[in-house]
Image (tube, rainbow, N blue to C red):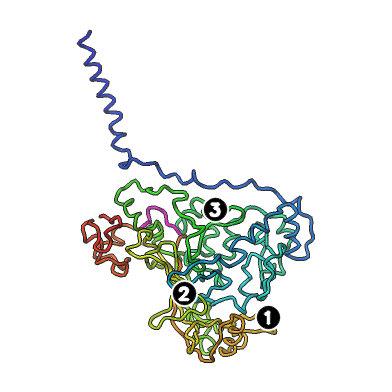
Amino acid sequence: MRSEKPLRLLIIAAALAVTILPVLILMPRNEQAQDNPRLNLPEHAAHVDHASLIEGPFADGPSVTRACLECHEDAAGEIMATSHWTWESPTVFRAHFGDSVRLGKRTAMNNFCIGIQSNWPSCTSCHAGYGWDDADFDFAETSNVDCLICHDTSGGYAKGKSGLPAESVDLVEAARSVGKATRQNCGYCHFNGGGGNAVKHGDMDQSLYYPDDWVDVHMGKHDLLCTDCHRTRDHNIGGRAISVSLDTANQIACTDCHIDRPHNDKRLDTHIDAVACQTCHIPRFAVKESTKMHWDWSQAGRDDIVEDEHEYLKIKGSFVYEKQVKPEYAWFNGEAEHYIAGDRIADEGPTAITRPRGDIEDKRAKIWPFKVHRGKQVFDVEHRYLLQPQTAGTGPDDQGYWNHFDWERALYDGAEASGFPFSGEFDFTETEMYWNVSHMVAEADQALACVDCHGEEADRMDWRALGYVCDPIEHGGRRFQHNEDRAEVTR
């Protein structure tokens, strides 16, 4: 009997090997947690049906807000502390100029509609408030807060000039429908920034209201809300736009939900030290709707060009729209350089309205994808700074370029509002504006592959512009000549 025991043990061991060994072989090569981002999604408050709580009628938008504040006493004050209300940041130091500024839509210039100074009623139609029609808007009045723009779910709410409700809006119906913010609420302004669908953001447009899986895997396949990623606390919405931000405060990241080494593949996970998730997972932007890539203001005012909203408008000049756009790539550490009114324009080449900070030696920086919008806009020949024209104006008695097509008049009126003198001599100069791309994430099997960036046939990355001697793969996986302190990208 004793002699049979070792034999039985050997048989048992062999059986275990047959059943367990295949499992061990098939287990992930890296010992790490499995990526399960749904475990990290925020919980949304239960919906409260307001249909029986709202009576009305309401004479105007502020009347609705006063009704909201009867129960939600702190809501307006919380909104007023956010950039959605102030359109301005706290004071931030600009290292590239050595000064401190307050940046935001309230003061920033861009190479789309240029700026809001003297053009308030048109520009503030997307402000989270009511009645901002001049420089004296009362930012302290709680009833000026627009609750409905973020919480209406009736589908019938719309804003007009100065952010006031459009005449067609049924305020009682809108107020009774309120609920958690949807993509329709956020997209109403963010998908239509710059005056129309897909104008500013190459990765945000109306195709994201109800996107196909291939348009955006998060909002399509997984039906995520904007606030699932842009976490919100006391009405302060997480996230920063390079178009109006200089620093990294209140930022969000893929790792808010995903683990920091999610691929279970050493070759891919090694890239994370130097490459943003978006770079591989957003191969193209403007995948369904064309986005504006160039705007030439110098062509405005002409009657000899046929108008087309994607090519030419007399009030705005000529445009170039593109679809299925391959991003441009640059190092980005989360901070940005930004042109501020009064800054001197570049002596040579285009003036950068925004530009990401970071380079190959910056350990905080990663290679990010960008939409780069290029334009041609007006500047003061003598003072050598960009000018803020009065384009839309503030009303029938204060008209802008879009009414009279007189550049000199528009520039004098804009200068009076902005406080930066106009010498009387103007011309047009090239500008460029970087917009980091984070939406329109492709499904995993559509992410970039090695051959998209590496090899003789690859044309996606400009390696020399990024600071490399050549394609890093030619180094055989060794550390790069100009990047001794950064984790290398291996084959």
Q: Does the magenta stretch include residue 445?
A: yes
Instruction: Magenta stretch: give its range.
Output: 440-447
Q: Earlier in the sequence, mark 2 or mark 3?
A: 3
In the figure, is residue 244 to the left or right of 148?
left
At label 3, the amino acid type is Arg
Categorize mark 3 by other alpha carbons within 10 Å: few (<14), some (14-19), many (20+): some
- In which quadrant will I find the C terminus? bottom left
Give residue 401's quadrant in the image.
bottom right
Label 3, label 1: how far apart the Cα atoms are: 38 Å
At label 2, the amino acid type is Ile
Label 2, label 3: how far apart the Cα atoms are: 28 Å
Label 2, label 1: how far apart the Cα atoms are: 28 Å
Residue denoted by label 2: 353
Label 2: element kind: strand
- In which quadrant will I find the N terminus? top left
- The disc placed on residue 78 is none
